[in-house]
Image (tube, coloured by chain):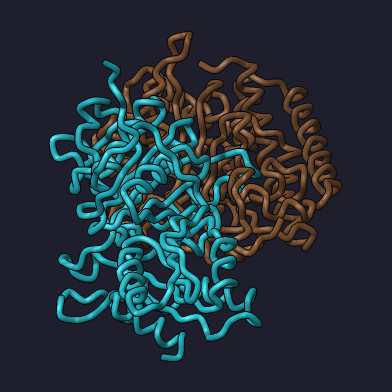
Amino acid sequence: MLTTSELQDMYRLMALITATSNRACAEVKAGSLQSAFYPVRGLEGVCAALGVAKQPGDQLVSTYRSLGDALAWGSDLRRVIAEIYGRADGVCGGKGGPMHLHDTSVGYMTSTGIVGSGIPIAVGLGIAAQLDGPNSNGTGRAVVTTFGDGATSIGAFHEGMNMAALWKLPVLFLCQNNQWGEHTPIAEYAGSTDLAGRAASYGMTAVKVDGFDPVATADVLREALERARSDGGPTFVEAMTYRLTGHSGSADYSYMPAEELAAALERDPVPSFRRAMLTSGQISEADLDSIEASVAATVDDAFTFAQASPEVEGHLRYRDVFAEGASLAGMGVRA
Amino acid sequence: MNEQTPLTETMTMAAALNSALHLAMDADSKVLLLGEDVADPIGGVLKISKGLSTKYGRDRVRPTPIAESGIIGAAVGLALGGYKPIAEIMFMDFTTVCLDQIVNHAAKLRYMSGGHTAVPLTIRTGVGTRRFGAQHAQNLEAWFMHTPGIKVVVPATAADAKGLLMSCIDDPDPCLFIEHFDLVFTQKDEVPVGEHRVPLGQAAIRRPGDQVTVITYGTQVRTAMAAAQELAEQGISVEVIDLRTLVPLDMDTVLESVEKTRRAVVLHDAHTFCGPGAELAAQITENLWGELLAPVLRLGAGYSPVPFAAGLDFHPTADDVVAAVGQLLGR
């Protein structure tokens, strides 16, 4: 059962994700952001559920469509946006970009631009968590990896799922099923669209949940994370959503069936949640309005900060190819 | 009577590698090994990891499914999680199945995160037999030299195998450590007892000479030494450089030698076309154009898949080196 404060947190996070995603797309379309940005519209409920279900110490491996995951995991919005702009104040110092956000200060270990490749990496983090064992409070560490439905077709998914089940690793495989693999609908690329059913065949717990329902999703994620932290093995969660935009920030999506998209927009997480809160009376209209106003100001502030952040200095070009001290002279780089 | 510890011991490269793994796992509980068949009783298909799982347990010496992408991905995750994994990819050809994890993840994560995520990973892989045919035989080191962010290490002696492997395991960045099957079983030399480290990025002059420099690494060091001996008997003085690591590349040692000899041959098992020798030849030429008495010659494998038929010549021989040196000297 979620508390009022948790419900407010979820609403704030969802509204923040929607507003930030929309703003980034607008900047891309205006030409003021030269960046491959992948919108997260439709995933807000899943991300908000993840935000309330995670605990300090848990670790995340995300993908290129990671804005919502990054905010759910507690990354600083200003520094995330500065990274999307490739500026010096970015979470990766400007060298990662929107497809490669990392923020180890909050346990956001990596994200990959290669579909499905984060899954084996999360398995390795899961082995590390299992070997480390519980912390001094007796709690284990869970590893979460997020990915879209499209990632379930590649070999890395199969290899990682098998290893996690084999070694009973503390990993939550969170499939953010938006029903599109780039520009191809799931029914055109998968023999069976029952991804949770496929996951169960590896020998792990698999659950399907309505990803447009953040409260139901939070319950499922909490249970899965608790299972991981208490050495109960991995879980696959298939959170059913729908992509409410094109594949990328500027992509055409006129090919998406209009009635399908319209039906999904009826369930757009932020307005749906707002209606539900007003109906149930769990959050007052004044509080919802106040959250929205504060979110709008936060997003403006973050984009202003990012746009003012300095360009990355030229002398950093060859830094972090290797750790400091390794000579690059033989490879043509003279200090 | 005082018991005297011998400073060195004669051992095969296989024994030296096994010794390095034991020492590294003993010294640091964060060092792990994972790969196909690495645990006892088999102890690795070449027995290099023999005894390790019995001593350190299967949590630390973890036999894996046949899943190279999973193995390297898991090793990257372990490295991000604070461990120092050693992942075994049985044959170098199998790195093709996990190139994504090596190239896009292991090699790039430090850079893409602005230095926040180091990947202290050692990948051990073998090459050098023709008995399985073309899919278990190709020297692919040039591919990895072409990928900024991963070090490439190839020992030619048992002592270096131990010293370089221990340095790779210590290294804060990913290293590809290439073990040549012929050398693993037949190369025997004096190996320091106990911990032994050879710094990465330092070539070794195996034989001093002043007329021609032969630059090589791995199993071709033997070929070069045999040729140099033969040439010495004809009164020709050849300097043999064993690069030991291809990344970082010790061009200072190479250029200093060629500045002296003014003639160079680059020699390796890898294909000549776009091979490591092409880079060496280009750098020598760019730096010493006015000093060279002849163009730099490259000796490597020809442009075909590795043939199974033993009757088909493939890797350079000592005769090839002798002929190349003769050509450089105008003979």
Q: Colour of chain B?
A: cyan
> Residue extending furthest bottom?
B331
For the point 75% across and 57% down, which residue is it? A33
For the point 69% across and 58% down, which residue is it? A35
Residue B283: give x, y in percent of width and height: 58, 72
| Front position in the image: A167 or B200 | B200
> Residue extending furthest top?
A137
For the point 52% across and 62% down, which residue is it? A256
- In the image, is A47 to the left or to the right of A221? right
| Front position in the image: B300 or A301 | B300
User: Relative to A14, is B283 above or below?
Assistant: below
Q: Quadrant of residue B219?
A: bottom left
| Front position in the image: A214 or A260 | A214
Is residue A173 visible in the rendered structure shown here?
Answer: no
Q: Quadrant of residue B5?
A: top left
**Chain displayed in brown:** A
User: Relative to A206, is A36 above or below?
Assistant: below
Is residue B259 visible in the rendered structure shown here?
Answer: yes
- In the image, is B288 to the left or to the right of A78? left
Residue A335: give x, y in percent of width and height: 71, 55
Residue B41: give x, y in percent of width and height: 13, 35
- In the image, is B283 to the left or to the right of A141? right
User: Relative to A331, is A148 above or below?
Assistant: above
Residue B310: give x, y in percent of width and height: 15, 76
